[in-house]
Image (cartoon, coloured by chain):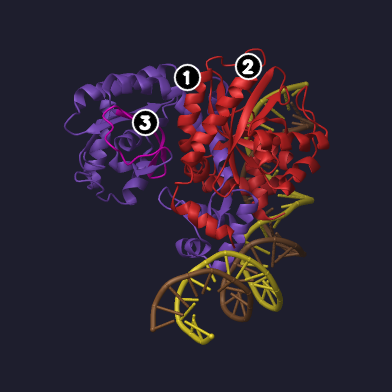
Chain colours: A red, B purple, C brown, D yellow
Amino acid sequence: MSLLARATAILDCFDVKRSALGVSDIARCTGLPKSTVSRLVGELVDLRYLERDGAQVRLGLRLFELGELAAGPKELRKLAFASMADLRDATGQTVQLGVLDGVEVVYVGILRGRSSVKLPSRVGGRMPAYATGSGKALLAFSEPDVVERVIANGLDAVGPRTIIDPEAFRRELAFIRAAGVSYEVEESRPGIASAASCIVDAAGVPVAAMSISGRVGEFDARRVGLAVRTAVVGLMRQLPHRPLDRIREQTGLSR
Amino acid sequence: MSLLARATAILDCFDVKRSALGVSDIARCTGLPKSTVSRLVGELVDLRYLERDGAQVRLGLRLFELGELAAGPKELRKLAFASMADLRDATGQTVQLGVLDGVEVVYVGILRGRSSVKLPSRVGGRMPAYATGSGKALLAFSEPDVVERVIANGLDAVGPRTIIDPEAFRRELAFIRAAGVSYEVEESRPGIASAASCIVDAAGVPVAAMSISGRVGEFDARRVGLAVRTAVVGLMRQLPHRPLDRIREQTGLSR
DNA sequence: ATCGTTGTTCCAGTGAACGGGACACACGGT
DNA sequence: ACCGTGTGTCCCGTTCACTGGAACAACGAT
């Protein structure tokens, strides 16, 4: 395990629930020797990636800065914001924007609806991809090996109706690919339903997914699904105009 | 230069203006050998701190996540948000919240005013402390060695009226400490004026500064200065109630 | 006073990072 | 076609910086 991996393991210990940790806490959490952790924490503090708060230590200012600079999610959020707001206003439900990272979906933007059922999601938070509307929408348009990796990673039931059978899951993705919309009822969490649609770029690679979630009762799947889909196609129409970097990426990808 | 310092030097190359860089760009910018950069970039990509975008590389998803988790700024922003909104609505000018980091102030929150004169500041952005309203307010309540470090670092003119004389600067801070408000007219940038006030915690250590900026013409310094000050004292009144972590910090600081 | 904590420091041993150089590739100019 | 210059990656012997057990000092609780 390289030094960088150790350092990042330290940063990974922090969570919305555990926002301040001691050296020993970190040593336990990472499995690294205490002396090593002490030294690395010291270096990270000097670099302002961590900051001391008495005997505890918490995530530092530089991470905040770099997070604000992380161009990808920011740009995406800006582009999608208008559509998301329309959707939120039209339905009153909460709208989310997520990207795929390995076997999980990371939410990069959230607009909470009026009927603010408290969703567990949070900007920067993660959920298993196979159990969420956004995740399934993204996987439906991803390469087969990405999907297989998710399946191989295990389809554990995280909600009352999570799809745990690999074959059923593949069929579900095929259906989503055809429909352009994914639905999910109590697959991620009891009492919650959602509909999502995948945003793909000009080359057909999935970029993000927009989803809309609400309480199972007050949620008209058909209607809402259509709304998400229309919002997404509207968004995609203005997507390929993004000039330089997209072109550069294209040429880069073509070897 | 340790490995961690090298890795962070790579991350520091990125900027709002240079959001995507190649390996050679980074090598030039950091002064590190290209082969070293290539290897480190590879590791950082594996760790998702960077992501490849064709031949270019940009800041990755994990930095975005960690930035969202950085508790300090987030908490502060939440606390100050109401007062900032009041101030913005009352004056129509843009309100900023900044913290001190070394010799610079980092903006952790911005509410743009109606008369949206385009300020150069940005959430997560930096400005030299000695040349801004927020920075001077923070320095006025900081330990002498902090102030001296800033002065030793050099008071270069960044605006038409930047204070560049060390002695004048010390007098300015003494005045601000007495008044509780700092003013700044064209010290940071031509055509811009601002007033700021420092938020100190129960122990008297400066935490952040709230500032309000506008075009020199449409800016009534007296009136606005008083408004900022009242907003800040109102904010501070509800500050010491913050329970556990503050107490822990206290005990930690008292050795 | 005696534990069980905490975090920090020391230092010799070693394994991982280093980086010069060779390499493959993609351009653009002549 | 032939360079010249730009990329980014990879190899591999050298070496030096990271490692981590152990000893340490400070607390707090029992």
Mark in the foreground, 1 or 2: 2
Label 3 residue SS: strand
Chain for numbered disc 1 = B
Which residue position is annotated with label 1?
A: B240
Q: Quadrant of the N terminus of chain B?
A: bottom right
CB under 8 Å between callouts 2 and 3? no
**In the foreground, B224 or A158:** A158
The verdict on residue B96 being magenta is yes
Which dot marks residue B45? none
Q: Amino acid at mark 1?
A: Pro
Q: Which residues are magenta?
A: B94-123
Confirm whether residue A98 shows in the render: yes
The verdict on residue B131 being magenta is no
Which residue position is annotated with label 2?
A: A219
**In the foreground, B74 or A72:** A72
Which residue position is annotated with label 3?
A: B209
Q: Earlier in the sequence, mark 3 or mark 1?
A: 3
Q: Is residue A61 above or below residue B179?
A: below
Label 1 residue SS: loop
Q: Amino acid at mark 2?
A: Phe
Label 2 residue SS: loop
Query: Alpha carbon of mark 1 to alpha carbon of mark 2: how far?
Result: 43 Å
